[in-house]
Image (spheres, rainbow, N blue to C red):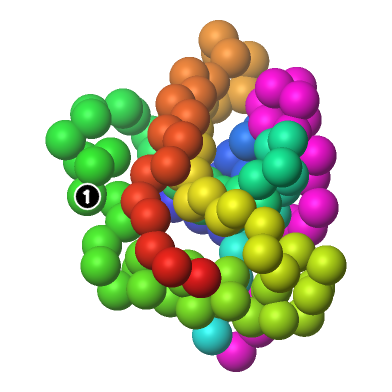
């Protein structure tokens, strides 16, 4: 997957989440520990969203998209985000994954699969 495809997938995911009523707080938030694709607020929850743009949608591959090391890095980066944004201390935290099917321009809209609470960790 190219960087351009990844950016397009993140843009599509942000539109989808905003359309679902979530407030986008940050995109591509970076620290030494890693990057958060999207940070959003869903009601009273702070949501860290990992975006995966794939050329096709075999669910067995999607389930393996976030290995243990990747989840650990996301949690550590989320801790850094909360440390830098103290107003979110004590807020319920959720980790979501949004899968975007990448398609060539001019074809049907991409399929989107939003996996809420994809995994849980203490932050």
Q: Is residue 30 above or below residue 41?
A: below
Q: Which residue is nearer to you in this view: 109 or 2?
A: 109
Q: Which residues are magenta?
A: 16-32
The residue under the point 79% across, 75% down is: 86
| Quadrant assignment, res 77 | bottom right
Q: Residues within 10 Å of mark 1 (few under 14, many from 20)?
A: few
Secondary structure under tag 1 reads: loop
Q: Is residue 15 above or below residue 64?
A: above
In percent of width and height, residue 68 lies at 25, 67
In percent of width and height, residue 84 lies at 77, 80
Q: Which residue is nearer to you in this view: 55 or 104?
A: 55
The residue under the point 49% across, 78% down is: 76
**In the rendered image, is residue 28 in sight?**
no
In the rendered structure, the answer to whether residue 101 lies left or right of residue 45 reads left
In percent of width and height, residue 113 lies at 44, 26
The residue under the point 49% across, 44% down is: 96
Q: Which residue is mark 1?
A: 64
Of all residues, the one furthest to the left in this rendering is 60
Q: Which residue is nearer to you in this view: 31 or 52?
A: 31
């Amino acid at each position: 997957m190219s960087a351009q495809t990844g950016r397009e997938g993140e843009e599509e995911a942000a539109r989808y989440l905003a359309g679902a009523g979530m407030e986008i707080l940050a995109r591509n938030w970076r620290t030494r520990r890693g990057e958060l694709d999207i940070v959003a607020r869903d009601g009273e929850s702070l949501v860290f969203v990992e975006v995966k743009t794939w050329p096709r949608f075999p669910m067995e591959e999607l389930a393996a998209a976030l290995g243990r090391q990747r989840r650990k890095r996301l949690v550590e980066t989320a801790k850094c985000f909360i440390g830098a944004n103290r107003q979110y201390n004590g807020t319920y935290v959720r980790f979501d994954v949004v899968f975007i099917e990448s398609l060539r321009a001019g074809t049907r809209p991409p399929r989107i699969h939003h996996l809420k609470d994809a995994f849980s960790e203490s932050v």
